């Protein structure tokens, strides 16, 4: 097609067609997700603000095309080669728009949000993510459909589309270049915070644009607390923490903490101290799936039996929504810092982790993972904090009965974990083994013949297989000579889903926690509300080891008035729940509060309480500053 023929066809301008196509795809996507999520009567918010974000995104998209069109020489514009290239570019643009829409549907199904920092992280781990998608969805059919629909779209437009633009004068070219600069500048008015305001987290998310949200997440993947959040003078924050019985050295103090603090003084229910600890961190296991926590679906008979024979903690809450956040809480005992978890950050070695504290006291810390530990920087983090690493690459081929893209089947993980623990026991060394499972994760595949739900069995099948593998593990562990001296701890890294009507739905952070040591721990129930960050100091106290004063968390069994407080977060919002009041710190120094129903855990907006706000700031500000200043690192042994 040449420019001289285009006007005779009363053709549509290329950029207009592309813009309208993008708006149509994004609007239909938003409509589909709105009908699926059913956010109530927030249509004006969803579609009104949605159009605002779509237009802002379009401004960035068309700017380079305007600049290219303005700078392209007239003779080259009219060539057949460039004409063919334009048709190919149109097909590709439509295909990418459709692919992005399908990707957003998949992402929404998993996380109930538009693209966010999780999507940014997944761009770094293409092998696992692409493999997970291939094993979970009919990728061939989806891609084939996208290719065919894009081609059909181009064919239908072949007689109506023009690539001609009136750029024959230098004034027209200057105007296009000016538009290419001014449109993105004008789009700067749109900010990710403008998605909020409906009172419904689903509606707020739907009001956004996936590409816009992805770009914002790339910019904010690591948030500086002091710049973005409400603050207190550090001396005041330290005093607040002191009144809350936080034992670590105040951040405003000039001296350094001792390498080993006072000896443990807990009043735990153990009849004697365990020599070893096996901390089983279960992928995505919400409390709502476990019979011992109220589920009636019969998915966890093994864990239910273990809970009946052990000590069940009834009210425990994860700090975040991802594995790395759970690993951070369980190993470092610190409230979640905004943005990336510390596991993913640089300068995260030699921190006051369980491993770094236990290793000088003669205990061998191990991190045993069913997948490839380079994912999410896990191996680097744990190796840099004195843990012995055992992951998928260390498992003999004949020991793996089944595997998918995320890792080996849990039964194979446990079999190899027993081998690693037996080696240390044979050397006469006590050990602290943190095992991280993978089977309870999409694509929810597992070996056949283990449970009565065929693979892939969805979330319910994966939970039931995970539970079956735990039963097998305990039966094999009982055969080992070190079993009687070992405490087994079963806890989730985070819940299966955090979707809810509010940004931080409290019920979606409740996880199971069970202590099992039949030779030294009577059965029972512990009903105090606890945080994931409290487990690390508790395990040190229970083992009779020094070092629990290095954590922000506090041992369960210490003789203090119970604080009844937990920390829940996503990558931006930092929640502090104490009593029935949830205080939420958000970027731009925003502070909100919610009254939480003690039975349903539903949240209702209310006015912030000044004292609770101070407590929330004190915890989160101090934790973020301590890491940034290197004050979470262990001092040299004295």
Image (spheres, grey):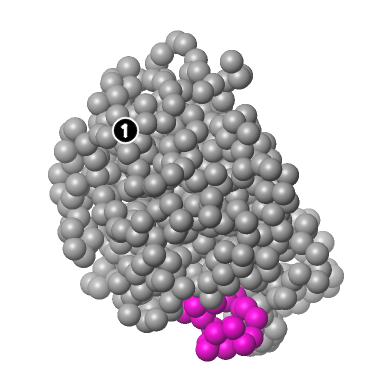
Looking at the picture, tell me which residue is in the foreground, 238 or 558. 558
Which stretch appears magenta?
A: 440-466
Looking at the picture, tell me which residue is in the foreground, 564 or 180. 564
- Residue sitting at x 74%, y 71%: 400
Left or right, 584 with respect to 286, comes to left
Spot occupied by residue 490 in the image (x, y as percentages of width and height): 47, 59
Quarter assignment of residue 556: top left
Tell me if residue 581 can be seen.
yes
Spot occupied by residue 507 in the image (x, y as percentages of width and height): 30, 61
Q: Is residue 72 magenta?
A: no
Spot occupied by residue 412 in the image (x, y as percentages of width and height): 68, 69
Quarter assignment of residue 195: bottom left
Residue at label 1? 617
- Residue sitting at x 28%, y 50%: 529
Looking at the picture, tell me which residue is in the foreground, 213 or 139. 139
Looking at the figure, which quarter contains the C terminus? top right
């Amino acid at each position: 097609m040449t420019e001289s023929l285009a006007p005779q066809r009363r053709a549509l301008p290329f950029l207009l067609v592309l813009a309208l196509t993008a708006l149509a795809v994004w609007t239909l996507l938003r409509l589909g997700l709105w009908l699926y999520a059913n956010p109530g009567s927030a249509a004006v918010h969803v579609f009104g603000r949605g159009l605002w974000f779509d237009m802002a995104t379009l401004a960035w998209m068309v700017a380079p095309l305007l600049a290219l069109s303005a700078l392209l020489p007239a003779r080259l514009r009219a060539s057949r080669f460039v004409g063919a290239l334009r048709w190919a570019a149109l097909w590709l643009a439509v295909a990418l728009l459709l692919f992005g829409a399908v990707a957003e549907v998949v992402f929404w199904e998993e996380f109930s949000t538009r693209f966010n920092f999780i999507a940014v992280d997944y761009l770094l781990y293409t092998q696992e993510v692409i493999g997970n998608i291939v094993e979970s969805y009919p990728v061939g059919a989806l891609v084939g459909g996208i290719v065919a629909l894009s081609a059909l779209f181009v064919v239908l437009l072949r007689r109506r589309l023009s690539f001609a633009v009136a750029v024959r004068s230098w004034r027209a070219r200057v105007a296009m270049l000016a538009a290419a600069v001014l449109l993105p500048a004008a789009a700067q008015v749109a900010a990710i915070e403008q998605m909020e305001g409906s009172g419904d987290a689903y509606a707020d998310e739907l009001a956004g644009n996936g590409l816009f949200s992805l770009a914002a997440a790339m910019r904010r993947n690591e948030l500086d607390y002091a710049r973005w959040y409400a603050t207190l003078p550090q001396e005041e924050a330290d005093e607040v923490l002191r009144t809350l019985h936080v034992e670590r050295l105040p951040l405003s103090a000039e001296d350094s903490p001792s390498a080993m603090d006072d000896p443990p003084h807990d009043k735990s229910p153990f009849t004697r101290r365990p020599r070893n600890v096996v901390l089983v961190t279960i992928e995505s296991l919400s409390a709502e799936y476990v019979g011992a926590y109220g589920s009636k679906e019969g998915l966890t008979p093994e864990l239910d039996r273990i809970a009946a024979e052990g000590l069940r903690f009834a009210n425990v809450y994860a700090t975040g929504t991802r594995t790395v956040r759970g690993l951070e809480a369980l190993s470092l005992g610190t409230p979640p810092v905004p943005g990336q978890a510390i596991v993913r950050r640089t300068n995260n070695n030699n921190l006051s982790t369980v491993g770094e504290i236990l290793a000088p006291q003669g205990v061998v810390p191990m991190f045993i993972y069913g997948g490839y530990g380079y994912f999410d920087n896990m191996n680097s983090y744990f190796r840099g904090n004195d843990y012995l690493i055992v992951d998928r690459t260390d498992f003999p081929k004949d020991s793996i009965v089944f595997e998918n893209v995320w890792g080996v089947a849990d039964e194979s993980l446990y079999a190899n974990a027993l081998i690693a623990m037996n080696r240390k026991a044979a050397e006469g060394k006590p050990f602290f083994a943190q095992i991280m499972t993978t089977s309870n994760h999409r694509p929810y595949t597992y070996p056949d013949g283990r449970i009565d739900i065929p693979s892939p069995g969805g979330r319910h099948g994966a939970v039931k297989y995970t539970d079956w593998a735990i039963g097998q593990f305990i039966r094999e562990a009982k055969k080992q000579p070190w079993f009687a001296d070992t405490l087994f701890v079963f806890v989730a890294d985070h819940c299966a889903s955090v979707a809810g009507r509010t940004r931080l739905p409290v019920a979606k952070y409740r996880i199971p926690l069970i202590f099992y040591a039949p030779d030294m721990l009577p059965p029972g129930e512990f009903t105090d509300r606890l945080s994931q960050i409290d487990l690390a100091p508790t395990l040190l106290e229970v083992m009779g080891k020094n070092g629990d004063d290095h954590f922000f968390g506090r041992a369960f069994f210490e003789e203090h008035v119970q604080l009844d407080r937990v920390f829940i977060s996503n990558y931006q919002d930092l929640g502090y729940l104490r009593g029935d009041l949830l205080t939420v710190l958000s970027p731009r120094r925003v502070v909100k509060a919610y009254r939480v129903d003690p039975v349903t855990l539903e949240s209702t907006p209310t006015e912030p309480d000044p004292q609770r706000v101070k407590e929330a700031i004190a915890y989160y500000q101090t934790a973020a500053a301590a890491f940034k200043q290197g004050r979470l690192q262990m001092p040299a042994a004295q």
